[in-house]
Image (tube, rainbow, N blue to C red):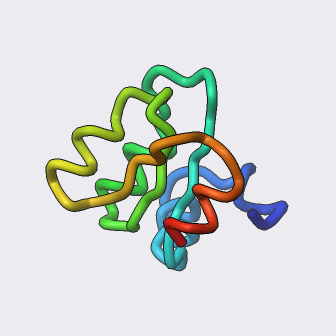
């Protein structure tokens, strides 16, 4: 992730997110991550851990992939 992305807001953030080919959020402790919801709204393909509680919705709607196990080998396999 670029350094400037984390400090982006509003229109600038949306423009940067629209440049993404995909988003990976392999968090182990987020119950409802805003960045993942924003990416999904913008139709950015996402890879997500089951700990975000959004993975099953992504899988059902064909908008992303939920990791079966949150480990580097599984992330690499899904990429």
Tell me if 3 is positioned left or right of 76 in this view: right
Considering depth in this image, is 34 or 14 the residue closer to the camera? Answer: 34
Point 46% across, 43% down: residue: 68
Q: Residue 55 falls in which quadrant of the image?
A: top left
Point 20% across, 61% down: residue: 62
When the figure is inspected, residue 42 is found, relative to residue 72, above or below; the finding is: below
Point 54% across, 72% down: residue: 79
Q: Residue furthest right?
A: 3
Considering depth in this image, is 76 or 35 the residue closer to the camera? Answer: 76
When the figure is inspected, residue 56 is found, relative to residue 3, above or below; the finding is: above
Considering depth in this image, is 22 or 78 the residue closer to the camera? Answer: 78
- Residue 77 in the image: x percent, y percent? 56, 67
- Residue 57 in the image: x percent, y percent? 22, 41
- Residue 61 in the image: x percent, y percent? 15, 53
Point 49% across, 27% down: residue: 51
Q: Residue 73 falls in which quadrant of the image?
A: bottom right
Considering depth in this image, is 23 or 69 the residue closer to the camera? Answer: 69
- Residue 41 in the image: x percent, y percent? 29, 55
Tell me if 62 is positioned left or right of 37 in this view: left
């Amino acid at each position: 992730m670029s350094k400037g992305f984390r400090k982006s807001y509003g229109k600038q953030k949306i423009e940067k997110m629209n440049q993404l080919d995909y988003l990976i959020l392999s968090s182990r402790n987020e119950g409802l991550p805003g960045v993942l919801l924003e990416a999904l709204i913008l139709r950015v393909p996402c890879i997500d851990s089951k700990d975000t509680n959004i993975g099953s919705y992504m899988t059902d709607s064909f908008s992303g992939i939920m990791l079966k196990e949150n480990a580097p080998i599984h992330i690499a396999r899904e990429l």
